[in-house]
Image: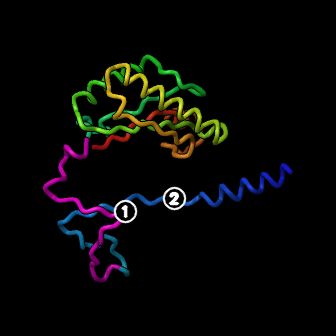
Amino acid sequence: MKRVLSILMLLCLGACGGTKRPPVVATTQGAGSDTRGGAGASEPQPLSEGPDIQAVDAGVASSRDMLSDPSGEGGPLQDVHFEYDSAALSDQARGVLERHAGWIKANPGLRIAVEGHCDERGTVEYNLALGDQRARAVRDYLVNLGVEARILTTVSFGKERPLDPASNEASWARNRRAHFAVSR
């Protein structure tokens, strides 16, 4: 019976193994340019809007809309890291979240998804639960600091989206995190 369940589980995991491509965003200026190059790029084809393609007006897109961090570290809100097998916020994490709360309150109209992540050790189920605990701990701390709960959502990715795919202590430490996806 265990062997049958193991085979079924492997089949299910194999069916979920594809990678999702990020959405394509075309601007209204030069939307028909083909940047692929190579032998198949003879004539530029215009992009048509659909669920994965959205036109962006050149006047609407600006660096402010990209919510970039002036420090150039890849985003306005840096990741918060956790110890192994823990969802407890360290003193360092609390300090980071206090700065984040100030930035969030100074930028109204945002939506923020707090993503809980884990390292590769442990089962899928365990890491999804731990990622959820991490995301909720961060959300609850931000709410206690005065951030409106209605703009914060949480999601757990467990070990499914590692920041660093290597298998060593340094990469595991980078993968144990809460990440912030900021949108308007």
Residue 141 falls in which quadrant of the image?
top left
Name the disc covering residue 19, or none: 2
Residue 108 is situated, as x and y percent measured from the top left of the image, at: 23, 34
The correct choice, above or below, for 47 with respect to 88 in the image is below
Q: Residues within 10 Å of mark 1 (few under 14, many from 20)?
A: few
The reply, left or right, for residue 145 in relation to residue 28 is right
Residue 83 is situated, as x and y percent measured from the top left of the image, at: 54, 25
The reply, left or right, for residue 91 in relation to residue 28 is right
Name the residue: 29% across, 78% down: 45
Residue 7 is situated, as x and y percent measured from the top left of the image, at: 77, 56
Name the residue: 32% across, 26% down: 147
The correct choice, above or below, for 99 with respect to 183 in the image is above
Residue 169 falls in which quadrant of the image?
top right
Q: Earlier in the sequence, mark 2 or mark 1?
A: 2
Front residue of 76/139: it is: 139
Indicate whether residue 49 is drawn in magenta: yes
Say which residue label 1 marks: 52
Q: What amino acid is labelled 2 in the image?
A: Thr
Q: Which residues are magenta?
A: 41-67
Residue 58 is situated, as x and y percent measured from the top left of the image, at: 16, 58
The reply, left or right, for residue 138 in relation to residue 57 is right
Q: So how many labels did they put on this image? A: 2
| Farthest residue, direction front | 150
Indicate whether residue 75 is drawn in magenta: no
Callout 1 secondary element: loop
